Amino acid sequence: MAVEFELLTAGPRVEELLALQQRYLRPSVIDPERGFLTWRCGESALRKIVAETPAAVAVNSGCVVGYIVVSTPQTASEDELFSPLIEHLRSLDAVADTSWLTLCQACVDYAFTGHGVLRALYSFLCDAYRARFAHGIGEISQLNRASLRAHLKLPRFRGHPKTGVSDAEKATTTAVLT
């Protein structure tokens, strides 16, 4: 299984990324125990994001089989899903003094899970952005146990469950990539 990695800034791969996103977006996911996506990013918003901060994509046989979309906090704060997270993170002294990226979304096609694609995507992403950003910070739904397990196996990830949330649909774990 030969997988190559590249940075996505524009072009037809944007449509491929959106098609993969749509396939795993709730509620269209067939098996939520295997992972799912909660954030739908439209084409114009995605094009704006990747023009500013290219996404890491995994490609097999010419097709996108995985990706990680990242954004600067400034751009991410324009999205209603991310604005509360960005506001909270900006209030933390530990984060306020560093440069960081928002980890918006990671997805690997089910056919490629368990083969190290997510780990390799994050390694590729870290290599691409290490000189500009100290951390990557995002949130993972606590209902998405497959994603939590996969991320917490990664060597540079730390998970911090959000406490005091009564609605299970809104419960998240803040993931920090260093």
Image (tube, grey):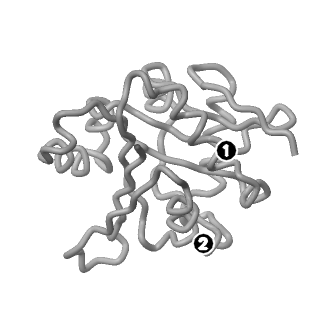
**Amino acid type assigned to the residue bearing label 1 in the image:** Gly
Identify the residue under disc 1.
Answer: 66
Provide the secondary structure element on which disc 2 rests.
Answer: helix
Instruction: Rate crowding at label 2 as few (under 14), some (14 to 19) or many (20 or more) other CA atoms within 10 Å.
Output: some
- Which of the two residues, 65 or 115, is positioned nearer the viewer here? 115
Label annotation for residue 165: none
Q: Where is residue 110 in the image (x, y as percent from the top left)?
A: 73, 59
Provide the secondary structure element on which disc 1 rests.
Answer: strand
- Up-down relation of residue 151 to residue 21 (above or below): below
Residue drawn 37% across and 51% down?
176
Identify the image quadrant of residue 53: top left
Residue drawn 70% across and 31% down?
5
Q: Is residue 98 left or right of residue 71?
A: left
Of circles 1 and 2, which is in front? 1
User: Earlier along the polypeptide chain: callout 1 or callout 2?
Assistant: 2
Q: Position of residue 75 (x, y in %)?
A: 31, 30
Label annotation for residue 32: 2
- Which of the two residues, 102 or 100, is positioned nearer the viewer here? 100
Position of the C terminus by quadrant: top left
